Image (cartoon, helix red, strand yellow):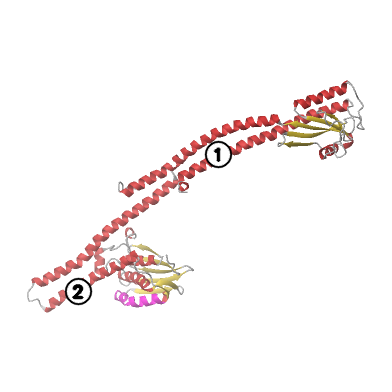
Amino acid sequence: MIALRSLRARIFLLTLVIGLVPCIAMRHGIVSNYEDLAVEQRTTVVQNQLMILANHLISNNYLSSHGVREDTGNSREVINAELEMLSNLYEGRVMIINKNFKVEKDTYGISEGKTIISEEVIKCFQGENISHYDPEHGYIEMTTPIMDTTANTTDENGKRNPDAIRGVMLTSISNDSIVNAKEVLNRKAYILEVIMMVAILALAIILSRALTRPFNRVTQAINAVKEGFSDETISVPDYVETVHIVDAFNQLLKRMKALDDSRQEFVANVSHELKTPMTSIKVLSDSLLAQENVPAELYREFMEDIASEIDRENQIITDLLALVKMDKKVQDLNIVSLNINDLTELILKRLRPIARKKDVEVVFESVRPVVAEVDEVKMTLIMTNLVENAIKYNKDHGWVKVILDADHQYFTFEVSDSGIGIPEEALTHICERFYRVDKSHSREIGGTGLGLAITKSAVLMHKGSLTVTSTEGQGSCFLVKIPLTYIAS
């Protein structure tokens, strides 16, 4: 069963079947068609000779109109000789039956004077020619009417006139010659079939190897990347399928490289972000220790700065822990049915004081009531981060617009602003950890650089999506799309 899962094995079997089935069918078809054609031709030839012989019987008065013999002598002997010759030529038997259903001549000489009444003979007296092939017993049986050509041979409908039929020839001929020829043809066809089978078998092996060779090259290239011998993109352009597989692998490789670079950058950023507050604390504390009789006001100012740096360090660690928990999915979602409209109103109420400090107008547009199955804490985090960022990175006297909408499957939470915007080259990186578009400006605004990374993780935990569009200097738009009904993995 494992072998049948191989593409090479399937191509081999498919080629073998496609080649052998027509080959076998062709052999049987040729032999069968030959037999049918040979029987038909033999029957036609014998029927023609019997018709000629029937005319001789009439012309020589072999049968009287009442089924009584009228002629004797040489003519009868000639006709008898013709009948014997026909019987010997086709290894058969000919019986001449008169209108009284009596056998006047039997080339076997065993049924003369006997009465024969059969369905074939009766139908022949009514004008029907009947031939029957019996392959099991090896003979062809046919009936031929003996027509008086001096009478009307057809009626007004164009059919044979039974009154013109003076007798019937019941003929049985051997099919041994057909059987012998069929056996010879069958042997030759069988030999040809064996030759074709060998050729098809060889073709199937060659095709299965040739057609799967590009996939083997794909496997080898992927293994080389996996073992670390190469980190370059691979190319196997033999088939469209291999191109698609290779393209998908190259995209995966690119993604893995990006993740690896992101991890290295993340470690560097974590070290930097954690070291910066510690360095500030060290500088401040050293400054205090280096001075004697420090005034209480200066001491207090330094201690406030130290406390601020400690808070910043604590916030970074808290955000990192939250992000790690989301990535590892250690923390399960607490799914509840929640009114998203009410939650949005509550979040905007909390954030409007921050917006008023920058004179930023916050507008909420609810297209329809939305009730969804979400984790309230993480949904609050998603909305808060997006709206708070829109306020922080906005211009003075700007605006933030929040739109809530839904269809029969998803609800959307859209946050657009009139802020500073995001450069096009930075759009794909803004959800990376510690990534900042303008680091100097971000320092002034504050934050850890983990907000959007945490937001995206929370969205993905809800089986949703986060898309961003932005024009630098004109503003940004963040669109969150989350299923109304949560489906656990």
Q: Nearer the viewer, residue 115 or 54?
A: 115
Query: Between disc 2 and disc 1, whose residue precedes?
Result: 1
The part of the image, by quadrant, that contains residue 120 is top right
Q: Is residue 191 left or right of residue 255?
A: right
Q: Is residue 310 left or right of residue 227?
A: left
Residue 175 in magenta stretch: no
Boundaries of the magenta span = 342-358
User: What amino acid type should be assigned to the residue bearing mark 2?
Assistant: Ala
Residue 445 is at least partly visible in this image: no
Determine whether the residue tagged by mark 2 lies in a helix, strand or loop.
Answer: helix
Q: Position of residue 343 (x, y in %)?
A: 39, 76
Q: Nearer the viewer, mark 2 or mark 1?
A: 1
Q: Which residue is mark 1?
A: 20
Q: Which residue is mark 2?
A: 307
**Point 33% across, 73% down: residue:** 360
Q: Position of residue 446 (x, y in %)?
A: 26, 69
